[in-house]
């Protein structure tokens, strides 16, 4: 190895970045070359000075952490749920409560229908959020909405998203049950109501038999 | 010389896990990353900028930027590499702005340490580190970055290539030039002292 090549490799040699054979060649050259040895010594001093500069240590209670935290809380992040698992959607409330929502939909929203005794005031036609005791499902936080197109049902995902779906998705296995609940003139007599109530109970029993996760097919 | 002074394997695993959660919007998980990497990020900023106050500001900016753009994290690289890239870019921005406004700042601080060493020892180290940073500050930007990342932070060549947006051969060449320039400056400084 000559001086020119040696000088090109000296810094890497001092930093232990050369492979064994090349390092041995440089070392052999240094044995015979005072000029390159002097260069090696100067590199050792310089790189040693760089390594001497200590690492920074911020004390745990340092204001830096508090300041960073405050600023982080204030910024808008691009973080978004990157689901490795499919989103699971649920009724807002329990399955039984969802069946109760169907009941309430029939009981309150159909024009001309007289609500059963004990029920509180009828909710409005849009964006209902009710938990009355009309069917004995008291204080269950059922949220559902009634849209112009015949019904939109609020759902919530296991990642906190909310959404709404129509009855064809909300009750994917029971489309006929839903369509049969309504009359063209929108009027339901007490007799019809009792029949509907029976159907509701049947529907509720079938719904309860499903696990909430079964509704994941309405996601996305 | 010991390279790879970065996070240990365990810490890396923990950080990757925290990063995954942070990418899902978990602010608390990102807080763990701040705790894990505050020293590294601030230290790198200090070495590039040479000023305590600027380094702390830059480190804060780096974490805020990281949180803002957390979805851009590429898990091909370690969290440390990603943060180093962010803080390096922010420090370069500051250096360029500073270059337009003024020169190298006075009042260099050595470390942000806890003061456990004796006053004489601390003063010596303080002075020496100040000299090192002053010499580094004289280097052209592209050489400064590779020298700090490799010889002070222990980053791998491939990591530096990723941070600087170049390739390994370019990094090696710049590193060789940077070391030679720094050695010349350091030798000249030592000669002046004697």
Image: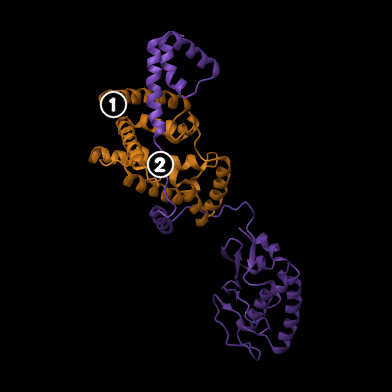
Chain colours: A purple, B orange
Q: Position of residue B5 (x, y in %)?
A: 49, 36
Q: Residue at x 52, y 14 (%)?
A: A24
Q: Nearer the viewer, residue B8 or A196?
A: B8
Does residue B116 appear to the left or right of A123 in the view shown? left
Tag 1 residue:
B189
Q: Can you see residue B50?
A: yes
Q: Nearer the viewer, residue A195 or B60?
A: B60
Q: Position of residue A176 (x, y in %)?
A: 73, 71
Q: Residue at x 48, y 50 (%)?
A: B35
Would you say the residues marked 2 and 1 are in contact, meaning their CB atoms lie under 8 Å apart?
A: no
**Disc 1 chain ID:** B
Determine whether the residue tagged by mark 1 lies in a helix, strand or loop: helix
Q: Can you see residue B92?
A: no
Say above or below: B11 vs A31. Answer: below
Both on one chain, marks 2 and 1?
Answer: yes
Q: Quadrant of residue A145?
A: bottom right
Counting residues from the start of the chain, the first of labels 2 and 1 encountered is 2
Tag 2 residue:
B43
Given this view, does label 2 or label 1 mark the residue nearer the observer?
Answer: 1
Label for residue B78? none
Instruction: Give the crowd class for mark 2: few <14, some 14-19, many >=20 residues within 10 Å.
Output: many
Does residue A178 appear to the left or right of B186 in the view shown? right
**Disc 2 chain ID:** B
């Amino acid at each position: 190895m000559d001086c020119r090549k040696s000088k090109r490799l000296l810094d890497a040699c001092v930093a232990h970045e050369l492979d064994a054979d090349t390092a041995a060649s440089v070392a052999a050259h240094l044995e015979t070359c005072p000029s390159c040895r002097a260069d090696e010594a100067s590199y050792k001093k310089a790189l040693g000075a760089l390594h001497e500069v200590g690492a920074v240590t911020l004390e745990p209670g340092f204001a830096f952490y508090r300041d960073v935290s405050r600023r982080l809380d204030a910024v808008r992040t691009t973080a978004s749920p990157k689901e490795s698992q499919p989103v699971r959607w649920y009724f807002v409330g329990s399955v039984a409560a969802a069946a109760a929502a169907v009941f309430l939909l029939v009981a309150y929203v159909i024009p001309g229908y007289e609500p059963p005794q004990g029920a509180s005031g009828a909710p409005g036609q849009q964006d209902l959020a009710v938990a009355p005791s009309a069917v004995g499902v008291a204080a269950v936080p059922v949220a559902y909405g009634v849209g112009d197109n015949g019904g939109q049902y609020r759902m919530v995902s296991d990642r906190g998203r909310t959404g709404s779906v129509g009855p064809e998705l909300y009750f994917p296995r029971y489309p006929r049950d839903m369509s049969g609940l309504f009359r063209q003139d929108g009027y339901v007599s007490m007799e019809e109501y009792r029949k509907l109530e029976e159907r509701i109970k049947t529907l509720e029993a079938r719904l309860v038999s499903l696990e909430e996760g079964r509704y994941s097919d309405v996601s996305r | 010389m010991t390279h790879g002074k970065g996070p240990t394997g365990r810490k890396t695993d923990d950080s990757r896990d925290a990063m995954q959660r942070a990418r899902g919007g978990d602010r608390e998980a990102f807080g763990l990353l701040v705790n894990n990497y505050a020293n590294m990020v601030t230290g790198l900023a200090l070495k590039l900028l040479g000023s305590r106050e600027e380094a702390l500001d830059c480190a804060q900016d780096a974490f805020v930027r990281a949180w803002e753009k957390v979805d851009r994290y590429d898990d091909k690289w370690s969290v440390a590499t990603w943060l180093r890239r962010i803080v390096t870019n922010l420090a370069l921005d500051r250096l360029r702005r500073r270059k337009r406004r003024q020169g190298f700042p006075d009042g260099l601080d050595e470390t942000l340490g806890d003061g456990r060493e004796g006053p004489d020892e601390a003063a010596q180290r303080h002075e020496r580190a100040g000299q090192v940073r002053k010499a580094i500050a004289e280097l052209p930007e592209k050489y400064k970055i590779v020298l700090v990342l490799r010889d002070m932070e222990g980053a791998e060549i491939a990591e530096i290539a990723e941070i600087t947006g170049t390739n390994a051969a370019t990094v090696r060449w710049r590193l060789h030039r940077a070391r030679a320039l720094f050695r010349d400056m350091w030798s000249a400084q030592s000669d002046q002292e004697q």
